Amino acid sequence: MSQSFIDAEVAANLDDVRTAIAQAEADGGRTKGAVALIGVSKQQPDERVDAALNAGLRIFGENRVQEADGRWTQRRPSYPDMELHLIGPLQTNKAKDAVRIFDVIQTVDRPRIAAALARAMADADRALPCFVQVNTGQEPQKAGVAPADTAAFVKECQDVHGLNIVGLMCIPPAEDAPAPHFAFLKDMADELGLAQVSMGMSADFPAAAELGATHVRVGSAIFGVRAKP
Ligand SMILES: *Cc1c(COP(=O)(O)O)cnc(C)c1O
């Protein structure tokens, strides 16, 4: 496929997603523009990522530090206004790289990661906004803090580690209706005085946008089906 064909296809997808977000903002009584769109570019070919950049998308999410490094270190200088979010699980030994590569960390979910990030941010003199990931479905295999532990963990991140916790993030169980998880996460963020809420993916971002998301994380609806990891 030629780059111009890919550009047209991704631009059309992006248009559809933006239209759906605007509609959801209206339906949910949200302020226009309240929901930021993160294009999840993990495991997507570079041509599709370039197409999204050509179409004006400037916020991207990646779930692996190494993949993000390869893709974005060379592109970033051309797009000084872009913002890169880490949306996948982080290992402590990658904290330093993550702080160098990303602008926002969405997946803080245990004390050792909070400590490693705090150390890396101090060393780099780079205080990144962070989200705490909440395992709203309490799935044993999934990352995130249990809902019952979230308030204490947020406080620990702030008071012990000095992290700038700006919000909460969740990935609802695939088999559940997502809306109750979205409403739950938004309520919890309100209770904790956190302004930002990252929730909603390709299958359910309109519901998330209606229910209070400030960030939706959309991959395949913009870029197409991902290659297998
Ligand atoms: C992959 C991923 C997404 C995007 O998924 P799509 O269904 O392709 O929109 C969003 N959030 C996280 C945490 C992901 O890992």
Image (cartoon, rainbow, N blue to C red):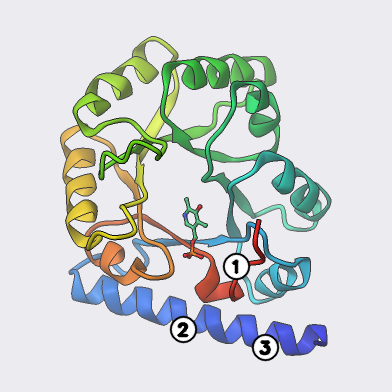
Which label's residue is closer to the chain start, 3 or 2? 3
Question: Could you tell me which quadrant the C terminus lies in?
Answer: bottom right
| Mark-to-mark CA distance, 2 and 1 | 13 Å
Q: Is residue 149 above or below residue 32?
A: above
On the image, numbered disc 3 is attached to which residue? 8
Q: Nearer the viewer, mark 2 or mark 1?
A: 2
Q: Secondary structure at mark 3?
A: helix
- Are circles 3 and 1 on residues that touch, CB within 8 Å? no
Q: Is residue 194 above or below residue 76?
A: above
On the image, numbered disc 2 is attached to which residue? 16
Q: Nearer the viewer, residue 178 or 102?
A: 178
Residue 1 is labelled as none
Q: Residue at x 19, y 28 (%)?
A: 148
Local packing at callout 2 (Cα closer than 10 Å; few below 14, some 14-19, many 20+) is some
Q: Residue at x 35, y 54 (%)?
A: 199
Which label's residue is closer to the chain start, 3 or 1? 3
On the image, numbered disc 1 is attached to which residue? 57
Question: The residue under label 1 is which amino acid type?
Answer: Leu
